[in-house]
Image (tube, rainbow, N blue to C red):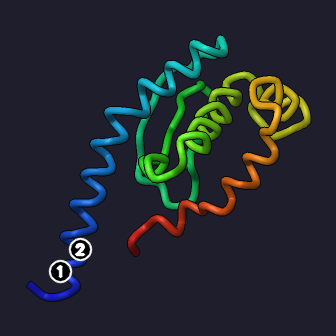
């Protein structure tokens, strides 16, 4: 097996394992956080995203990056709460940050901390 083929095989195995972990953990954790804070969402999709940790659609469907599994738990929770808050406030205006800060008083500081973990650095290619 050539070096590049071996690397591709390893990357594929790592992503498969990461997805398995994400499927087992993220849906339950998102629902727990939603229930705890009285937030609702329509659906959840787990994706291997290159530039985002998560997103929330206009129809309140949440997408989460499987690479959240590689973050400290507090940062992954922040991303999930951030996306859940988008079910109420669709943009990052003052009302969004005020609402998120009622759940996480240090939301802005956590957001800055998250920037140190750019999702682009977690990808193999």
Residue 20 is marked as none
Q: Secondary structure at mark 2?
A: helix
Left or right of residue 11, residue 74 in this image:
right
Asked whether the beta carbons under mark 2 and mark 1 sit within 8 Å of each other, the answer is yes
Front residue of 63/6: it is: 6
Q: Position of residue 63 (x, y in %)?
A: 50, 38
Q: Secondary structure at mark 1?
A: helix
Q: Which residue is mark 2?
A: 8
Q: Is residue 46 above or below residue 121?
A: above
Q: Is residue 48 above or below residue 12?
A: above
Q: Position of residue 30 (x, y in %)?
A: 51, 26
Quarter in which the C terminus is drawn: bottom left
Q: Position of residue 106 (x, y in %)?
A: 80, 38
Which class describes the residues within 10 Å of circle 2: few (<14), some (14-19), or many (20+)?
Answer: some
Front residue of 72/108: it is: 72
Q: Position of residue 101 (x, y in %)?
A: 82, 30
Please identify the residue farthest to the left as the structure is shown.
1
Quarter in which the N terminus is drawn: bottom left
Q: Which residue is mark 1?
A: 5
Give the residue displayed 22% in from the left and 84% down from the top: 4
Give the residue displayed 66% in from the left and 63% down from the top: 116
Left or right of residue 5, residue 25 in this image:
right
Which class describes the residues within 10 Å of circle 1: few (<14), some (14-19), or many (20+)?
Answer: few
Please identify the residue farthest to the right as the structure is shown.
94
Please identify the residue farthest to the bottom as the structure is shown.
2
Q: CA distance from mark 2 to mark 1?
A: 5 Å
């Amino acid at each position: 097996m050539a070096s590049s083929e071996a690397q591709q095989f390893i990357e594929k195995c790592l992503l498969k394992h990461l997805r398995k972990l994400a499927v087992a953990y993220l849906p339950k954790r998102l629902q727990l956080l939603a229930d705890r804070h009285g937030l609702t969402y329509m659906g959840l999709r787990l994706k291997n995203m290159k530039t985002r940790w998560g997103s929330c659609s206009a129809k309140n469907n949440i997408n989460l990056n499987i690479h959240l599994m590689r973050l400290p738990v507090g940062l992954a929770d922040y991303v999930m709460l951030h996306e859940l808050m988008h079910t109420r406030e669709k943009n990052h205006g003052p009302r969004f940050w005020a609402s998120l800060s009622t759940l996480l008083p240090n939301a802005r500081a956590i957001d800055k901390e998250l920037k140190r973990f750019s999702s682009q650095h977690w990808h193999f290619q």
